[in-house]
Amino acid sequence: MATDSSNDSIMTDSDKLRIVADFILHAPPGQFREVFNGWNYFYFDCSVILFCTYSTDVRHLLSNDSLLKDKASNIFAQYRKDQLTPAALSDNEFTLITEFNELGSNRFYNPKTKKSFKYDFLTEETSEIQSWEPDAANEPWRSALEEIWSVYCADHYYNGISSVFATNQHDHFVLSACIEAHQFQPNNYWLVVAFAILLLMILKSRNGLWRSIWTITFNPNLGKAEIFGKIKAQVHYYENGNVQLVSFKEIKDSTSFSSEKQLAENFKSIVEESENEYQVAIAKNYQNMSDTTFKALRRALPVTRSKIDWHKIMGYRIGSEIKQT
């Protein structure tokens, strides 16, 4: 008995949401709206070579605004937190959207100004700003680190945004220091060279994102802290075809301290050395990729090893036909 195979190709809402999640979470830096509304690109992971093409938009894929609002909102929230998305509370006040300052019900807090706010993951708008009180025990440690961390960010990252958050875990404090720095100009071609912000852009345009998350876990009475860092650089290269490159590194270290200020200064020295080493390594690796990986993406010259004069292309064709007669 024959069966209707057309049913096999019908996607369920769960299938659509899974695909939407993949589209959104792998969106190129600064191009959430383009993926949401439709675009094309390749995805390339430095650790696992992976190329994917995207040529649709998630809203059209779902074709159901109710499903988009009710189910896909969690995907948008994850994307914003993963990206350390900057949130503006005013013209001069910014913080980051992260897992560390989430209060629930789409609310986050800015520890520096002691405010909480509601955040729209789709429009990136903040609202319902209220006062917020930090934990009295860990706030001196957090504020000491914030003072040094903000200076470090300003010295090393052009237009970078930094935040420091604090939580308690049993008898330990955990400080989470984050930096987000980006360069978004998605309308032209660009080429990236790693240095400083990792993204020293040349040619006509640039689109890249730097994220670093560092955690310090310590008991203030023991004088020793464990440090763990995650650095992630994400850049997008496109010229007709599109390639996204993602590079990341994890770092572990430790330090001793006798005061809030000493912990902050020791931590800053460890971060500075680690991030400088990483950026230099990326710069060297990029040069190697320019000579190998990127050349493999397209042939520099035709098989004749000579550039074609496109103004004479019809002449080439006529000459070929004459030879055949």
Image (cartoon, rainbow, N blue to C red):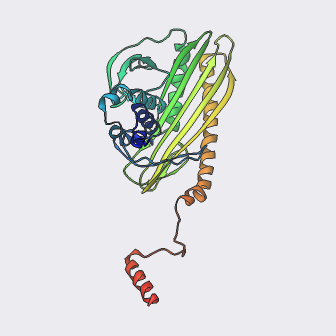
Q: Is residue 317 left or right of residue 218?
A: left
Q: Nearer the viewer, residue 224 or 190?
A: 190
**How many numbered marks are there?**
0
Q: Can you see residue 312? A: yes
Residue visible at 69% across and 25% down? 254
Q: Can you see residue 239? A: no
Q: Is residue 93 left or right of residue 209?
A: left
Q: Nearer the viewer, residue 43 or 176?
A: 43
Q: In this view, does 21 lie to the left or right of 173?
A: left
Q: Quadrant location of residue 15?
A: top left
What is the x, y in percent for residue 121?
Answer: 37, 28
What is the x, y in percent for residue 62?
Answer: 35, 36
- Vertical position of residue 20 compared to residue 313: above or below: above
Quadrant location of the C terminus?
Answer: bottom left
Q: Residue furthest front?
A: 1
What is the x, y in percent for residue 165?
Answer: 51, 20
- Vertical position of residue 143 compared to residue 2: above or below: above
Q: Nearer the viewer, residue 50 or 291?
A: 50
What is the x, y in percent for residue 71?
Answer: 38, 27
Residue visible at 56% across and 60% down? 295
Quadrant location of the N terminus?
Answer: top left
Q: Which residue lies furthest to the bottom in this view?
A: 325
Q: Nearer the viewer, residue 36 or 12?
A: 12
- Vertical position of residue 206 compared to residue 8: above or below: below
